[in-house]
């Protein structure tokens, strides 16, 4: 045993004082000083998860919900590399993570010492900052330097744009301290006072002039966190029929009366209708959108003006028509816009009415399909979404899952929040993210995921923290069923073994191993009967596996797509 390096002991104290009170630890020897310093701090909640890749996604899901930084701790070497997928996802979703990686001292890097790789800039360019603590803190300046770095790192997880920050921590042996640690409460912390962004009066005059003079105005909401104030403003703004709102399924704007089934409408093959529905002025906010139809048509029929509302100055020109970046929050922009639009002016409701007419037709098309559809993924998605409890959290898997949800559309549901890892859109970490999200609340947290994503991330359930409010719905079509409905891949001779990757696995054993309640359904009738009990509160997490015939499923989707193309 030895006296502990005080600069390491001070890290959790600084974190606690600056609001970082949750840490996910993966065990290791080199990281022992960090682990013990955090475990013994009374103001920090620690959870230990062996699999670093899963641990990082659990942290991401937790940070996503509490909207505050969550810390990660791991040992040196490839353990740190396993954080990379979640770090990249957090970067593009703008979720704050504080990533602490233990390391060998610098003189031992590249010297054939065990568990040693180059860890500086390990996650570049997918982190807001990459910092390293001094290896020695015997001089007072080194202590000052360490404390300054930790404060800076926490600040940069939150401003100017939230995201992950990496601190590499070189540590010398011996690594295990005496039992008693002394936390210095007078550590140096640096507070960041975040400014409020505004647009100048002259800028508003120009924007309002363009807004009032433009007939076809479309607002598109991309990936975003729930914001009740913003939703009320958007609902008021479009109430008079002066503009149209398309809310992506992951935008959390389903409660402000957006156009329903916009993705279906935009799947029409009628070019004259496509042209009619495209705007002259496009206003966007949030992150990536799920709808490929929307992206393709906005690139084909480019608006004359495109305003992107974002605090970040990055030039993200998704629709190839960007003319203005407005560096303010969506809440400020739309609230000010709604208040400054002149009252009593003549409004043209034709564009709004056209979209509403098409939404009604899309609803009739969907109802007609669902009324006669065989047991398939689209029918199941509609059934699950309609049964989601109010005041709950929905986590959507990637690939076909989030696309199906976007086609069905979310009805207005009180207190329902929606999340999906659409920053990088990978299938890795789907279950782990949902576990992290469920840890942040007592409300029911429902993950809908495909079978490949579920089995890929089954280690998410290999820990002591899976909460009883977690609900997992697994769509099991025996492989990557999306490749049966994608243009080009469905007819490949290599489809089954190399793209779809056929399997006959069931989730039952995974549920049994980790103590989850389990039920299997392979018919629409069985599903409808199972959902009320599945969503009821209980003392254990629950898993509902829904089995599909891949050919029936693909044929049903192709029929639906044909019906969608006939919407006119």
Image (spheres, helix red, strand yellow):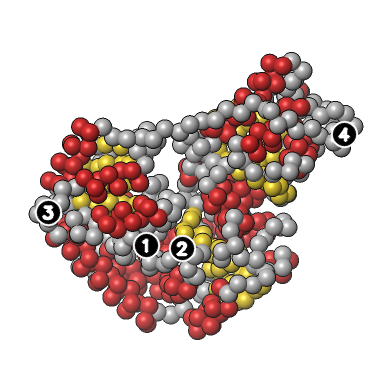
Q: Is residue 139 visible?
A: yes
Question: Is the residue marked by circle 1 packed among few (<14), some (14-19), or many (20+) residues within 10 Å?
Answer: some
What residue appears at the point 38 percent right and 68 percent down from the top-left corner? 411
Q: Which residue is mark 4?
A: 178
Helix or strand or loop: what does disc 2 sit on? loop
Question: In 3D space, how far apart are the residues under numbered discs 3 and 4 (Cα atoms)?
Answer: 74 Å
Q: Which mark is residue 416?
A: 2
Helix or strand or loop: what does disc 4 sit on? loop
Q: Are marks 1 and 2 in contact (CB under 8 Å)?
A: yes
Question: In 3D space, how far apart are the residues under numbered discs 2 and 3 (Cα atoms)?
Answer: 35 Å
What percent of the width, then of the height, locates residue 492?
45, 60
Question: In 3D space, how far apart are the residues under numbered discs 4 and 1 (Cα atoms)?
Answer: 55 Å
Label located before the other in sequence (3 or 4): 4
What percent of the width, then of the height, locates residue 41?
74, 41
What percent of the width, then of the height, locates residue 282?
24, 47
What percent of the width, then of the height, locates residue 424?
48, 46
When asked about the image quadrant of residue 312, the answer is top left
């Amino acid at each position: 045993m030895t006296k502990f390096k005080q600069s390491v002991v001070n890290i959790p104290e600084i974190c606690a004082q600056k609001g970082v009170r949750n840490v996910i630890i993966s065990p290791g020897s080199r990281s022992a000083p960090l682990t013990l310093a955090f475990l013994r701090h009374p103001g920090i909640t620690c959870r230990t998860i062996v699999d670093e890749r899963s641990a990082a996604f659990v942290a991401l899901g937790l940070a996503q919900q509490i909207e505050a930084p969550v810390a990660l701790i791991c040992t040196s070497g490839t353990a740190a590399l396993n954080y990379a997928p979640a770090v990249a996802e957090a970067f593009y979703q703008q979720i704050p993570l504080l990533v602490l990686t233990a390391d060998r001292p610098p003189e031992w890097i590249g010297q054939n010492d065990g568990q040693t790789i180059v860890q500086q800039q390990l996650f570049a360019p997918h982190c807001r900052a990459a910092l390293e603590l001094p290896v020695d803190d015997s001089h007072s300046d080194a202590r000052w330097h360490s404390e300054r770095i930790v404060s800076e790192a926490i600040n940069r997880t939150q401003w100017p744009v939230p995201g992950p920050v990496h601190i590499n921590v070189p540590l010398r042996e011996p690594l295990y301290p005496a039992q008693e640690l002394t936390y210095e409460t007078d550590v140096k912390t640096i507070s960041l006072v975040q400014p409020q962004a505004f647009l100048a009066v002259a800028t508003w005059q120009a924007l309002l002039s363009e807004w009032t003079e433009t007939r076809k105005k479309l607002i598109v909401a991309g990936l975003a966190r729930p914001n009740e104030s913003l939703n009320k403003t958007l609902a008021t703004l479009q109430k008079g029929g002066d503009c149209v709102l398309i809310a992506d399924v992951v935008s959390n704007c389903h409660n402000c009366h957006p156009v329903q089934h916009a993705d279906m409408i935009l799947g029409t093959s009628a070019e004259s209708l496509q042209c009619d529905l495209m705007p002259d002025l496009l206003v966007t906010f949030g992150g990536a959108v799920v709808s490929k139809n929307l992206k393709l048509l906005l690139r084909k029929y480019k608006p004359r003006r495109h305003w992107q509302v974002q605090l970040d100055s990055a030039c993200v020109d998704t629709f190839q028509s960007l003319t203005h970046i407005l560096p303010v929050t969506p809440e400020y922009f739309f609230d000010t816009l709604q208040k400054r639009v002149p009252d009593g002016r003549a409004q043209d409701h034709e564009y709004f009415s056209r979209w509403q007419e098409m939404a009604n037709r899309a609803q009739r098309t969907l109802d007609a399909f669902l009324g006669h559809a065989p047991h398939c993924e689209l029918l199941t998605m509609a059934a699950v979404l309609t049964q989601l409890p109010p005041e709950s959290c929905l986590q959507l898997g990637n690939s076909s899952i989030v696309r199906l949800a976007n086609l069905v559309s979310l009805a207005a549901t009180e207190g329902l929040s929606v999340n999906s890892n659409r920053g990088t859109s990978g299938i890795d970490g789907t279950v782990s993210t949902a576990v992290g999200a469920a840890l942040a609340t007592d409300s029911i947290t429902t993950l809908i995921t495909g079978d490949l994503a579920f089995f890929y991330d089954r280690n998410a359930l290999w820990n002591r923290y899976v909460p009883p409010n977690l609900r997992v719905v697994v769509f099991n079509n025996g492989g990557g069923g999306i490749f049966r409905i994608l243009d080009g891949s469905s007819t490949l001779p290599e489809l089954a073994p190399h793209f779809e990757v056929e399997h006959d696995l069931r989730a039952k054993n995974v549920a049994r191993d980790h103590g989850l309640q389990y039920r299997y359904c392979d018919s629409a009738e069985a599903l409808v009967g199972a959902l009320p009990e599945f969503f009821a509160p209980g003392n254990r997490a629950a898993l509902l596996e829904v089995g599909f015939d891949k050919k029936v499923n693909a044929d049903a989707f192709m029929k639906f797509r044909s019906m969608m193309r006939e919407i006119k």
